Amino acid sequence: MSYYCDVHPLDTLRTYKYVVVLSRYQGKYLLSRHKERTTWETQGGHIEPGETPLQAAKRELFEESGAVRYQIKPVFDYRAGDDDGEANGMVFAAEIEELGPLPQSEMAEVKAWEQLPENLTYPAITPVLWKAWQEKP
């Protein structure tokens, strides 16, 4: 199966299914590991009915990292997909100032990394989004 990920200027895709949060903590990438996987991922997920993308990003960031104090902002849109279909999302950048305990959720742990690890849950998406953010003027 082939996967792809394209980055678009903020607010150009208009309809969003997902949010992704590119989180930094103490100058490092902050990634989460799902209880059922051995791979690492950014925080994010589905936008629930009635939620704005920002509300979804804040909820997912807390649920999947325990972040309690942070600065968060939208940075760009993305479209990702595979042979079975595609979906639009909005990407946020978060500078985390304080982590609390990891809430009871699907995540097993969080870890700060100097660089993105090899074993990513979404290897066709995560590096593309981080690179786009780092190159953003």
Image (spheres, helix red, strand yellow):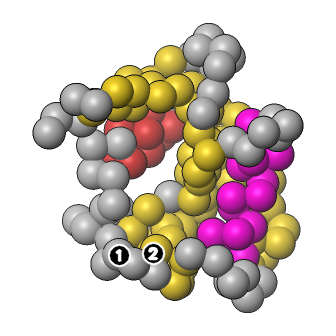
Look at mark 2 in the image and give the residue it sits on: 33
Question: Which residues fall within the magenta stretch?
Answer: 53-66
Q: Tell me, yes or no, whether the two marked residues, 2 and 1, touch with CB atoms within 8 Å.
A: yes
Which quadrant would residue 12 be assigned to in this image?
top right
- Camera sees residue 135: no
Residue 43 in percent (x, y) is at 57, 59
Q: Secondary structure at mark 1?
A: loop
Where 68 falls versus 21 (above or below)?
A: below
Residue plotted at (77% across, 84% down): 100
Identify which amino acid the numbered label 2 is placed on: Arg
Look at mark 1 in the image and give the residue it sits on: 37
Return the residue nearer the eye: 113 or 53. Answer: 53
Q: CA distance from mark 2 to mark 1?
A: 7 Å
Magenta segment: does it hold 64?
yes
Which quadrant would residue 60 be assigned to in this image?
bottom right
Where 44 falls versus 70 (above or below)?
A: above
- Camera sees residue 44: yes
Of tags 2 and 1, the one toward the viewer is: 1
Image quarter of the C terminus: top right
Residue 7, labelled with which disc?
none
Residue plotted at (63% across, 69% down): 64
Residue plotted at (31% across, 62% down): 120
Return the residue nearer the eye: 8 or 17. Answer: 17
Q: Residue furthest top?
A: 12
Q: Secondary structure at mark 2?
A: strand
Residue plotted at (46% across, 81% down): 35
Secondary structure mostly seen in the magenta stretch: helix
Residue 105 in percent (x, y) is at 64, 77
Q: Label 2 neighbourhood size at 10 Å, few (<14), some (14-19), many (20+)?
A: many
